[in-house]
Every structure is written in structure tokens, then in C-alpha cells.
Image: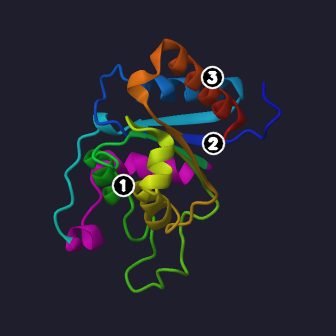
Amino acid sequence: MSSNPVRRILLIEGHPDAQGPHLNRTLADAYAEGTKEGGHALRRVVVGAIEFPLLMRAADWLHGEVPPTLKASQEDISWAEHVVIFFPLWLGDMPALLKGYLEQVARPGFAVGPEGAKPFGHKPLSGRSARVVVTMGMPALAYRWYFRAHSLKSLERNILGFVGFGPIHETLIGMVDKLGDAGVAQWQARLRKLGSEGA
């Protein structure tokens, strides 16, 4: 049992392939194992296993009903003290399905203030921390320094930070095609440790 405070953690698997096996699933499993070792409460969402429509117009986001399949995700986010999002970097960004999921879940009145409220003064999800775990084919340093981690920063600033999450930590895992079994095992150990710490 960890000496860290027990936390309510929501793990969101953002890989569109719900069946696996793939590296994101392997690493998410390691993190989940760590949360058990640390005595934390864990809920898990597999985005690829949820059927939901994409938003097609602004009016749907503002006034449309949240799909019934995603109301449970909103409840999970409300319950959580810490949210961990795993996804692979595709075409320099998160997979489109994960983006569509976040657009549907982050509705006015839940994740952002109701229409007409001051957008920078009302953060309904304040008090929650987050970690974003991103796997990629390029070196993580190249993504961070050459590409300025633009898509990650957009997620942190324009979605998570905007609705009140903070602090937001990141774990970048590069050169995934060359990790080999030993490299994967090292990352599993790191993610398991983060899970046990509730970080």
C-alpha cells in the first residue's frame, strides 16, 4: 500500500482500437495495476468501445442532448479527482475519435459555463488534476522542441486548462517502434509507479 493519499482516478483510453492489443493498452494496464497497488479508486473509459455521433454544428454542442452513451463519462469525470488520458499521436494530433469524444463530453453547463457566462471566470471542473500520456513514432524530444508539442499544448490549454484542470502533467513516449520488449517493460514500470502514486 502506498503512503500517498488515496485518490479517485479516471483512466481514459483514447486509442480508437478498443480490441487491442497495442502499446497504449499495455501502458494503460500498467498504470491501472499501479493504482491497485496504491489503494486508489479507479474507473476506466475505453473511447473506442463507445458508440456516439460526432458533432456536426455549433448549435448541437450548445443545445443538443448529450448522447446517452456518454452521460456515464460525464459522471466519471465529475467523480474523479485525477484524470489520465492515454493516446497515440496520429498525424501530429490526438486521434479524431478522441477529439470527437471530448467535444461531446465537454458541453456547456458541464465542462464550461452556460451560454452567456464569462468564459474565463467559470471553470466547472476546477480542483481536478490530469496527466496526458502520448505515444509516438518520432523522438519525444523532437515533438517537444522542434514541433513545440503543439497538439499536446492545445489539449492542455484549450480543453483541460480551460475547464479548470490543473496541474496537468505529461508523459511523452517516443520512438515506439524501436522500444523492444525491454523498452516497453521500462515504460510499464514507470507507468505502474505513477499509478501507485496517483500521479
Q: Main secondary structure of the magenta part?
A: helix
Which residue corresponds to the image point at 55% horizontal and 81% vertical from the top-left?
Answer: 121
Whole-percent x and y of residue 119?
46, 80
Asked if residue 62 lies in the magenta stretch, the reply is yes
Whole-percent x and y of residue 25?
42, 26
Which element carries disc 2, helix, strand or loop? strand
Q: Earlier in the sequence, mark 3 or mark 1?
A: 1
Residue 19 lies in what quarter of the image? top left
On the picture, is 58 further left or further right than 130? left
Q: Earlier in the sequence, mark 2 or mark 1?
A: 2
Give the Cα distance between marks 3 and 2: 21 Å
Task: Look at mark 1 in the image and give the residue it sits on.
Answer: 102
Which residue corresponds to the image point at 57% horizontal and 50% vertical from the top-left?
Answer: 130
Three-letter amino acid code at the position of disc 2: Arg
Q: Dot 1 surroundings within 10 Å: few (below 14), some, or many (20 or more)?
A: some
Tell me, for residue 8, which label it has, or none: 2
Q: Which residues are magenta?
A: 58-81
Asked if residue 11 lies in the magenta stretch, the reply is no
> Where 37 falls versus 50 (above or below)?
above
Three-letter amino acid code at the position of disc 1: Leu
Task: Look at mark 3 in the image and give the residue it sits on.
Answer: 189
Give the Cα distance between marks 3 and 1: 29 Å
Which element carries disc 3, helix, strand or loop? helix
Q: Earlier in the sequence, mark 3 or mark 2?
A: 2
Whole-percent x and y of residue 192?
62, 26
Please state, as top left, top right, bottom left or bottom right, where the C terminus lies in the image. Answer: top right
Q: Dot 3 surroundings within 10 Å: few (below 14), some, or many (20 or more)?
A: some
Q: Are marks 3 and 2 in contact (CB under 8 Å)?
A: no
Which element carries disc 1, helix, strand or loop? helix
